[in-house]
Image: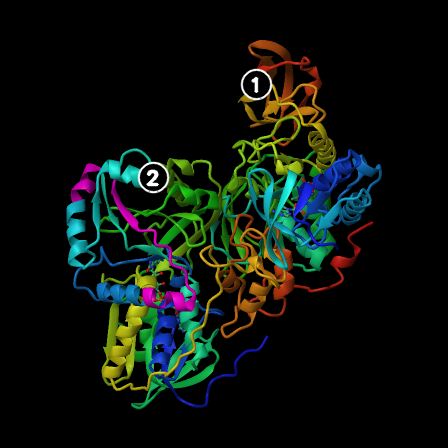
């Protein structure tokens, strides 16, 4: 591995699907000296420790395991001429593309003409969920569980409780099965699993009970988890288990943006971007799940590719500024991007999420003039997209996207 | 893992029972004065009791009861911490505190508090106008009536400090025994025969520093108790580092008769905490978190600092104050039995530990424990865990960062797993290095940590961890 040089054209932070696909695309589009900075020992991001999932459909038109997929993405980035530097943590970002970096050799500062934040997302911790009880060992997010099982070959417990019902909860279920753990059950606030068929059928197939409308009130145990108190439709009850898997409720890994100078969207918790993926400091871009929790690897890969091209264009000739601002109203949890340049080749869609399950009317108005109106049935765990191509070329002003119950 | 052999042989000068901040400071003082010390701790690692979760404020004693033993110990402890922290490489955040009145009633109480502070010798307190408050703390919410500043209230690292005291004791000859609960004891008029979970220990003096178990340990030692513990729980919410810029001072409320009230302050590690509650309970060991209480703390925090709204929560924790039916410390020499009880160190033990230890050494001397002070004691340098010092990730040869949120390097983890007082549990490793104590709470680094610590902790990170069994690793892919 060559040493990290103090200057580059594009520094990509994070070697997950988004960062690696951006590296390939940016190189192909002539971005020059492209480096990918990854704090782990291996590139690949989250898929490195997803043993079972079907990856690669969108990207390589075949079903791959997470590790093979991660390796393939990294190989492509290297083949495209990007330098991947592992064990290289970006500690802080500064205006204009200056980065404070730490490696096993110590700290250094580098300068990049453009920086892409592709730092991914993570699940919400026990603490941030304000779960009660004691703090024994054996409480893990799915990501940590998968790291233990698939990267280290460690079985952290035998009879865990799985909390949550998003897709990743079923990943957790499969991870348990792979390692010979037998979950005592799945508990989630929703009446029925959020994940779509066929994942929702898995618990029954595996003989794991699903408890809907149930929250975890307290965790018990001093050294190790000995049980939990669940609160469901029939009141509180104690359940013995030796671990708790807290799945889902994803949020961007936004430490750099949060402690740095970039504007953050409180709704997504990711940096505010325009349709080219550009942040409030135009030297910075963002793509992949750094923008929001959570989309699939394939989605992030596609997003990275487009933003990689946009960055190369910006490096070559500069990108025009966005002309539209976006406001999300009504029952929308968020709308992304926050600013749009009609005709940009970056993010192809306005990405929306509903704040709660509802049937209602989705409207798009530009400075008071309605552009689109349709009835939809929305659920918070499903993305809603509106192609930006429906916007008139050269449009400017304030775009309001609104979701209203009923209608 | 290597465990020390049971200590049956040579008698010690003093056996200190309890490895909280008080026991650690006692071990240091007694050792430096020339006593041969053994510290006996029930848990697998030290600092597992009251000392594991506090507000980490180094108090001046401005609001302590005038004339109390607590006040004397706090002020002596405060002075000694200021004297030694640099040589031990312990952080000191000179934040100062502000006592803020939010109601008219509270405002009328301020003059008395200021007078009390001055009576206690804290004469640099400064009354502030509302405009003066705002000028210093622009982030405060509406409703401030009056306030005063206590410039000498500081923030410290609640774990590095006691670890440093204990390490200095051990490096100068003291002996540490963990997983060594005191089970029974007998005094034969010349020495104590202590039966611990790790075997028998003989010592001339027995010092009880058992925190929330102080009365029970007194019953073991003396067959009687002079006070009864009723732990007082304090819950906290720790906010993301982005919140730390919202407050400079330690923001104290006007104390009521029952509690010091909800404090908002930064931590030495750059987070911001809101807490503690004051909840009496019978259980001496379990400090349970209660979601509704945590939510209420957050609401109170947002009233004090509206900028906290929407800030992410990094951690939650609860600690148990060793409270008794008495307000003051319960430090007693047991005449004719070569024993001292150091009990009821309720809510200021972190500040007072060094001073308390001096006071107790004085008592022991009076009872005939003599020693020749160590001539040139070893002074350990603690690892820099706060941004005050140069962190290991900034230095060559650090082995790479393992915990990305708190930027803890492989070399730091290795050092904490070995060394004179090695970590015995994940909690102990956290307190020594801060691993998994940041934003992601172990999402990214748990797997690597489990690998590094495998076989090296008394309480393993993962239950019946199957390292490298056939269920793992190799065949994840298609
Ligand atoms: C537990 C879990 C299971 C999942 N399972 C699936 C699944 O089965 N199928 C699916 O399609 N999607 C799944 N996902 C969604 C997953 O996020 C995406 O698959 C995809 O990995 C996102 O790609 P990304 O490039 O945005 O981020 P990531 O893959 O998360 O990559 C981000 C990279 O950035 C690095 N990084 C972060 N901060 C820094 C820094 N400061 N300095 C240097 N490097 C940094 C990280 O180490 C990481 O390698 C899962 C997500 C999680 C958390
Ligand atoms: C919520 C809260 C906030 C606080 N804030 C502050 C602050 O800001 N500033 C400040 O100065 N102080 C503060 N304090 C007070 C401070 O934390 C305590 O005074 C201090 O930790 C007490 O230490 P200790 O050594 O007496 O007790 P402990 O830390 O409880 O130590 C006693 C030890 O004895 C061991 N033990 C018990 N029984 C046995 C046995 N039979 N055999 C062997 N070992 C035994 C226990 O395992 C334990 O480790 C706070 C406390 C709390 C709870």
* Residue at image mark 2: B304
Instruction: Confirm whether the magenta stretch covers residue B168.
Output: no
Left-right relation of B139 to A67: left
Please rate how many residues cluster around mark 1, counting C-alpha atoms within 10 Å: few if below 14, some from 14 to 19, many from 20: many
Q: Quadrant of residue A10?
A: top right
Give percent across and percent down for residue B344.
29, 65
Q: Would the CB of label 1 be found within 8 Å of ligand 1? A: no
Residues rendered magenta in the picture:
B81-109
Which quadrant does the N terminus of chain B fall into? Answer: bottom right
* Residue at image mark 1: A402
Q: Quadrant of residue B331?
A: bottom left
User: Can residue A403 be spotted in the picture?
Assistant: yes
Q: Nearer the viewer, residue A241 or B336?
A: B336
Give the Cα separation between the discs numbered 2 and 1: 34 Å
- Relative height, residue B82 to residue A112 (above, below): below
Chain letter for mark 2: B
Q: Would the CB of label 2 be found within 8 Å of ligand 2? A: no
Query: Going 39% across and 57% down the picture, which residue do you hit?
Result: B319
Chain letter for mark 1: A
Q: Quadrant of residue B350?
A: bottom left
Query: Going 36% across and 53% down the picture, which residue do you hit?
Result: B234
Give percent across and percent down for residue B158.
40, 60
Q: Secondary structure at mark 2?
A: helix
């Amino acid at each position: 591995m060559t040493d990290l040089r103090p200057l580059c054209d594009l520094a990509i932070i994070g070697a997950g699907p988004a960062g690696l696909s951006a590296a390939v695309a940016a190189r192909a589009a002539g971005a020059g000296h492209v480096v990918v900075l990854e704090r782990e020992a291996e590139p690949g991001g989250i898929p490195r420790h997803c043993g079972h999932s079907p990856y690669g459909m969108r990207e390589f038109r075949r079903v791959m395991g997470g590790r093979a997929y991660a390796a393939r993405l990294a190989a492509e980035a290297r083949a495209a001429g990007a330098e991947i530097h592992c064990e290289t943590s970006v500690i802080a970002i500064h205006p204009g593309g200056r980065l404070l970096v730490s490696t096993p050799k110590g700290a250094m500062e580098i300068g990049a003409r453009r920086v892409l934040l592709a730092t991914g997302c993570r699940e919400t911790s026990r603490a941030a969920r304000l779960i009660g009880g004691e703090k024994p060992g054996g409480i893990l997010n799915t990501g940590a569980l998968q790291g233990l099982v698939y990267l280290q070959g460690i079985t952290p417990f035998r009879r865990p409780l799985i909390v949550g019902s998003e897709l990743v909860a079923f990943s957790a279920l499969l991870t348990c099965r792979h390692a010979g753990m037998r979950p005592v059950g799945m508990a989630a606030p929703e009446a029925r699993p959020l994940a779509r068929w066929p994942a929702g059928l898995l618990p029954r197939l595996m003989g794991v009970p699903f408890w809907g409308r149930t929250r975890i009130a307290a965790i018990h145990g001093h050294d190790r988890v000995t049980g939990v108190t669940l609160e469901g439709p029939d009141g509180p009850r104690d359940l013995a288990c030796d671990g708790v898997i807290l799945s889902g409720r994803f949020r961007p890994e936004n430490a750099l943006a949060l402690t740095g100078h970039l504007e953050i969207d409180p709704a997504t918790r990711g940096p505010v971007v325009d349709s080219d993926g550009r942040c409030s400091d135009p030297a910075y871009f963002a793509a992949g799940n750094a923008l929001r929790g959570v989309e699939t690897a394939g989605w992030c890969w596609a997003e990275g590719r487009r933003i990689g091209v946009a960055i190369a264009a910006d490096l070559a000739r500069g990108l025009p500024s966005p002309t539209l601002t976006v406001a999300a109203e009504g029952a929308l949890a968020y709308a992304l991007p926050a600013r749009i340049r009609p005709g940009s080749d970056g993010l192809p869609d306005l990405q929306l999420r509903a704040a709660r399950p509802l049937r209602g009317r989705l409207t798009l108005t530009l400075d008071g003039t309605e552009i689109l109106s349709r009835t939809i049935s929305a659920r918070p765990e499903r993305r809603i997209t509106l192609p930006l191509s429906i916007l008139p070329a050269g449009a400017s002003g304030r775009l309001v996207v609104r979701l209203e119950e009923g209608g | 893992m290597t465990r020390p052999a049971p200590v049956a042989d040579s008698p010690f000068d003093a056996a200190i029972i309890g490895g909280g901040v008080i026991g650690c400071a006692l071990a240091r003082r007694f050792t430096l004065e020339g006593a041969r010390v053994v510290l006996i701790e029930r848990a697998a690692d030290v600092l597992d009791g009251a000392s594991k979760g506090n507000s980490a404020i180094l108090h001046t004693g401005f609001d302590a009861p005038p004339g109390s033993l607590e006040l004397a110990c706090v002020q002596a402890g405060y002075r000694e911490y200021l004297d030694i922290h640099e040589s031990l490489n312990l952080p000191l955040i000179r934040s100062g505190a502000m006592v803020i009145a939010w109601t008219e009633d509270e405002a009328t109480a301020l003059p008395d508090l200021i007078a009390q502070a001055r009576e206690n010798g804290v004469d640099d307190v400064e009354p502030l106008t509302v405009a003066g408050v705002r000028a210093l703390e622009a982030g405060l919410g509406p409703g401030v009536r009056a306030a005063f500043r206590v410039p000498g209230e500081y923030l410290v690292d609640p774990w590095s400090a006691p670890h440093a005291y204990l390490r200095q004791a051990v490096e100068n000859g003291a002996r540490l025994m963990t997983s060594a609960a005191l089970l029974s004891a007998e005094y034969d008029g010349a020495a104590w025969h202590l039966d611990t979970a790790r075997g028998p220990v003989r010592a001339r003096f027995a010092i009880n520093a058992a925190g929330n178990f102080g009365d029970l340990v007194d019953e073991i030692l003396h067959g009687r108790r002079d006070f009864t513990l009723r732990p007082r729980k304090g819950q906290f919410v720790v906010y993301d580092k982005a919140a730390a810029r919202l407050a400079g001072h330690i923001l104290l409320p006007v104390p009521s008769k029952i509690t010091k009230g909800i404090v908002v302050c930064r931590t030495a590690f750059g987070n911001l905490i809101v807490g503690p509650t004051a909840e009496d309970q019978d259980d001496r060991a379990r400090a349970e978190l209660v979601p509704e209480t945590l939510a209420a703390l957050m609401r109170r925090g947002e009233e004090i600092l509206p900028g906290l709204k929407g800030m992410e929560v990094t951690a939650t924790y609860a600690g148990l104050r060793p409270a008794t039916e008495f307000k003051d410390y319960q430090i007693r020499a047991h005449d004719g039995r070569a024993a001292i009880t150091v009990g009821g160190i309720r809510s200021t033990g972190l500040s007072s530990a060094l001073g308390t230890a001096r006071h107790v050494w004085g008592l022991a001397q009076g009872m005939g424990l003599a020693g020749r002070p160590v001539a040139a004691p070893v002074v350990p340098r603690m690892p820099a865990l706060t941004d005050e010092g140069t962190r290991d990730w900034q230095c060559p040869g650090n082995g790479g960062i393992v915990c990305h949120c708190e930027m803890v390097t492989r070399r730091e983890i290795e050092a904490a797993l070995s060394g004179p007082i090695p970590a015995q549990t994940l909690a102990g490793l956290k307190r020594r290095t801060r691993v998994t104590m940041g934003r992601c709470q172990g999402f990214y680094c748990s797997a690597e940590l489990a690998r590094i610590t495998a076989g090296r902790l008394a309480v393993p990170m993962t239950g019946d961890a199957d390292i490298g069994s056939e269920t793992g690793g190799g065949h994840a892919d298609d």
